[in-house]
Amino acid sequence: MTSLLTDAPEQTPAPARRPALRVRKDGLEMPRGRRWWQEVGWRHAVGLAGVAFAGFPVLYIISAAFNPLGSVATTEIIPNTFSLVNFETLLGGSKGPFGLWYLNTLVLCAVVSVAQVLLSTLAAYAFSRFRFYGRRGGLLALLLVQMFPQFLAVVALFLMIADFGRIIPGIGLNTLAGYALVLMGGALGQVWLIKGFFDSIPHELDEAARIDGAGHFRTFTSVILPLIRPVLAVTGLLVFVSVIGEYILASIFLTDNSVKTLAVGMFGIIAGDRSNNLGVFAAGSVMIALPVLLLFLYLQKFIVGGLTAGSVK
């Protein structure tokens, strides 16, 4: 019995692993890491830089709000000690009726937001769906008016509200109702935004509703209105943010301490002593940001849900 002995095949060493390369248009090879940086990496770097640039003031204000010393020189990004003394001082009333200012601002924001969204929606629906004499001129006039800021008409608005107050004291100067009327004039700025959304809705929906016997109002409320929830949510949020931070007109029309808004009241706190009142001002700023944050989180589901559900089948 013989055994056959065969030589084992020689094992060649595996080639060294080379980085994945990509052939460019000019025929040259480019490493994968460099490819990732040129395509998406630089975008991440720019995004992180933007987040850092925008987040630094927010972190500084939050740190100053919880810093018991509450001055510019002692405020750091990460304070050594945390305290609620600034919030206690603010809510205690020694710097002013912060609770009343807060309530005035929330009521004003709610009323003006609802009124502006309602007026803008009705006007945008008319410009989008109806054809009438002067329609094109009206749209151009709305566009022209938006080129000028509202405070350019502050003298005329002041005289107008003063005259209203002589006839109806409830809507005159130093009244929230009179100031709300002034802010409602900003509803013109939302008409173009909502009209563009109306134009994207097919007219076949209106025709189908009319065949079923629905009038213009029923068509608007039952068919069109549910489809425009995304733009209504965006418009309401923009109006709310603009009203809660409006200072120029509020400082002119609201001078009594009992009718001031947060913007005017908080400026009075920081204007007295900018260094030592920084902590109290920062605490108020944090509390002012809470309604905006909560409203954005609440309306986010309407924005996303309305965009996905508002399709034509």
Image: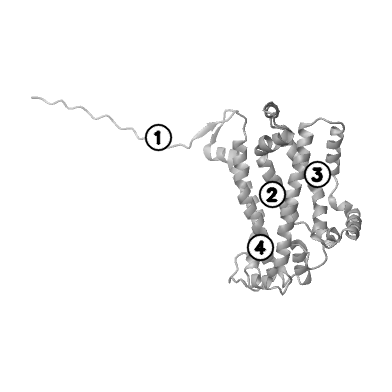
Kind of residue at disc 2? Leu
Question: Of residues 48 and 55, which is closer to you in this image?
Answer: 55
Question: Of residues 63 and 296, which is closer to you in this image?
Answer: 296
Mark earlier in primary sequence (4, 3): 3
Mark 4 neighbour class, 10 Å CA radius: few under 14, some 14 to 19, many 20 or more: some
What residue do we see at 64% from left, 54% from top?
Answer: 293
Q: Which residue is tagged 1?
A: 15
Image quadrant occupied by the C terminus: top right
Mark earlier in primary sequence (3, 2): 3
Mark 1 falls on what kind of element?
Answer: loop
Image quadrant occupied by the N terminus: top left
Residue 56 in view (yes/no): no
Is 82 displayed left or right of 281 in the figure?
left
Is 141 displayed left or right of 110 in the figure?
right
- Residue 302: % across, % down: 62, 44
Kind of residue at disc 3? Leu
> Which dot marks residue 188?
3
